[in-house]
Amino acid sequence: MDLPRQAIEAALSHNWTLAAKLNLRILRDSSKDIDSLNRLARAYFELGFKTKAQKTYQKVMRLDKFNSIALKNLALVKFATVPRHTHQNLPANSIPNFLEEPGKTKNVILTRLGNPKIISRMRAGDPVTISAREHCVSISSLSSEYLGRLPDDLASRMRSFIKGGNVYQAWIKSVDSQGGKQTLKIFLREVSKSPKFKNTPSFPSTEKLTYAAFTPPELIHEEKPTILTPEEDQEVFGPNSDKDFDQEGSMPSGDEES
C-alpha cells in the first residue's frame, strides 16, 4: 500500500500519531503536496497541536488560496479549544465507507444542534451514538456530548425499530459552517434487523413518479376542425388544387394575395 493510502487509513482509524508521521514522510519528498498538508494539519489538530495545525493550514492557503478544506478548517481551528489527546484505534469493521444501500442506509441532516464548539471538533468518519428517547432520537459523540436530533418524522419511525430490536450505527458525514450557521450531516446504517421487521425496510424510498397529464385536443377546443371529403375538397378548391402548390408546400408567388 502506498504512503498516501496508509495515511488515509490511519486517519480513518483515528490513529493520529501514525497519520502525522506518514504525512511528514510524504512531505519530505514533496513539500508542496496539498493533500498531505491538509491531512497533516488535521492530525496535528486532533493531537492537540493547535498552533502547528494553524501554520500547516496557512501553508496550504499560500499554495492555494482557494483551497476549501484549508479555508474551512483554518476557521474552525482558530476558535476551537482542543485538549491534547489521542484517539484509540478503531476496529477496521467500524470504519465507514459511506456506501449507500437502498432501504438500509440514509444520509440525515440533524436538527436542534448542540454546542457549536463541540460540533466544530467533529470530523467526517467520527462514529456517534444513537439514543432513542420518549419523544426523540438524539445523536451524541462517543464522549456522550450531545450533537443534535433526527428530524421528527424519521425519529418517530426509528424509535419503533430500535425498541423492536433493530440495531443501527452512525457516523459523521459532514460538518459545514457557512454564513454563521452550522450544518451537521450523519450517515445511518442498519446493522441487524429484528425478525419482527424482517420484511420492513428501515429507510424506504420516498421517490415518487411524476406523470404528465394528457388532455385530448378535442376536449380543449370547443370547435372541432372541419374535415372535408375528397368530393367536398374539389368543390371548394377546384379539381386542380393540388397543382397550385409548389414542392415545398407554399403557394407560387404569382398566386399570392397582395
Image (cartoon, rainbow, N blue to C red):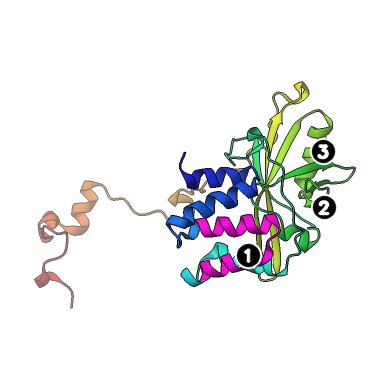
The image quadrant that residue 204 belongs to is top right
Work out whether residue 256 or residue 240 is closer to the camera in this orientation and state it.
Answer: 256
Residue 78 vs 12, above or below: the answer is below
Crowd class of label 1 (few under 14; some 14 to 19; many from 20; radius 10 Å): some
Q: Callout 2: helix, strand or loop?
A: strand
Q: Callout 3: helix, strand or loop?
A: helix
Q: Which label sits on residue 146?
A: 2
The image quadrant that residue 221 belongs to is bottom left
Residue at the extreme right: 134
Who's the residue at 52% across and 43% down the image?
Answer: 6
| Dot in front, 2 or 1 | 1
Could you tell me residue 15's position as x and y percent?
64, 45
Q: Which residues are magenta?
A: 36-61
Q: In the image, 146: left or right of 31?
A: right
> CA–CA distance between discs 3 and 1?
43 Å
Who's the residue at 15% across and 72% down the image?
Answer: 256
Crowd class of label 2 (few under 14; some 14 to 19; many from 20; radius 10 Å): some
Residue at the extreme bottom: 258
Which of pointers 3 and 1 lies earlier in the amino acid sequence? Answer: 1
Q: Amino acid at mark 3?
A: Arg
Crowd class of label 3 (few under 14; some 14 to 19; many from 20; radius 10 Å): some
**Prevalent SS, magenta region:** helix
Work out whether residue 26 or residue 193 is closer to the camera in this orientation and state it.
Answer: 26
User: Badge 1 is on which residue?
Assistant: 52
